Amino acid sequence: MAEDVLLTFNAGSSSLKIGVFEMVSGAAISTGRAKIDFEARPLRLVGKISGLAFERELFGDPVSDFGEVVDQVIDHLGAVVSGKIVAAGHRVVHGGMKFEQAVHLENSVVDDIESLVLLAPLHQPAALRVIRAVRDSTEEIWQSASFDTAFHASQADAVRRLAIPRAMHNDGVRRYGFHGLSYTYIARTLARIDPDTAQGRVVACHLGSGASVCGMIGGRSCDTSMGFSALDGIPMATRPGWIDPGALLYLMRTGMRQPERIEQFLYHECGLLGVSGISGDTRVLLKDPSHEATEAIDLFCLRVAGEISRQAATLGGLDAVVFTAGVGENQPEIRGRISERLHWLGLELDDGRNEANSQVISTPSSRIKTFVIPTDEEQVIADEALSVLSHHRL
């Protein structure tokens, strides 16, 4: 008998990642993935379900005809999955102070998510337009939202505070943290493969085009590098990470006066791209012999290692480091350069295992265990959606 199907939607500004899951005996079993690149022409839905690759051309403009595009996606997926699509889970970057766990997307909840757009102006609207497009396409698909900020709700108040007047903190100007779905998956997976280590002091490094570091004890977030926004912390592909507020005041006084211009600058012109003047992609920079490319990589590794060390101060020590996401999972040289700066903490890499992207890349004598664990945000979204749906049906 065909199983009911749950879709997950992970919306970005230039792409939409879709997970396909069968709902089997109370579990979400992954059967495929699909993706739309909104910058490609012609627009296509490309993916693989149950081992079979497929590609479908989509008609309409991804901006002005987005609802029509989503209609086609649901129709195409409905034709290739073995069961009926009954539910959808969405990744929403910001939950503000209101959402600390996944929720059913009632109309009032969608309005509450809309009210948080100013906290994540580039990320929140992307998720909202998919949520609304699915809702407008059919009322038969039940929907939930999973929040990237929710994982960090366990942090102590002192960690979440900025050194600003208390009234501003109470109004929501505070450190939230992001990449929570990824860290949730890492915490669960580490608990399965090495339960004793997972109960200790672990720093997970989500290193991709967006990048952050999270310190955990017993799988719970204690601190993280990103703060009020996804601009904070370590340098990223095109985002600066930590930047002196005085530098922004200087830029405002010398010509960069409009908030929209500053936003464009901070999200798209800084980070590894800004330092190198070449690319924000570490794969490109590692192949480039220029001084600028080398300096960008060195800066990135220095800042990541420094942030891991800061997390160790919050945790009161360090038992393990986990590398994940595109850079963390696939680039041994980056892992090696970061780890070299942590040798003083007792971290020793096995070069051969590191080059092979093995699950454990530290030496047996290393005081700090070091792992490479591929992340799976879509699985977390699906698991949380299924949990919310189960409670909703009670």
Image (spheres, rainbow, N blue to C red):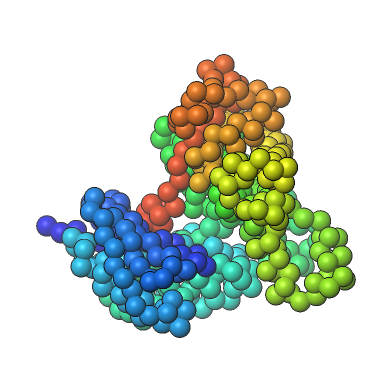
Considering every residue shown, the one lying at the far top of the view is 365
**Could you say which is closer to the camera, residue 80 or residue 196?**
80
Q: Quadrant of the N terminus?
A: bottom left
Residue 354 placement (x, y as % from top left): 51, 28
Considering every residue shown, the one lying at the far front of the view is 289
**Could you say which is closer to the camera, residue 315 or residue 251?**
251
Left or right, 285 with reference to 372: right
- Vertical arrangement, residue 317 with respect to residue 245, above or below: above
Residue ID at (34%, 66%):
45
- Vertical arrangement, residue 164 with respect to residue 108, above or below: above
Residue ID at (49%, 49%):
182
Residue ID at (45%, 45%):
375
Left or right, 251 with reference to 48: right
Would residue 227 be visible to someone looking at this image? no
Would residue 69 be visible to someone looking at this image? yes
Residue 123 placement (x, y as % from top left): 56, 67
Left or right, 256 with reference to 149: right
Residue 224 placement (x, y as % from top left): 64, 48
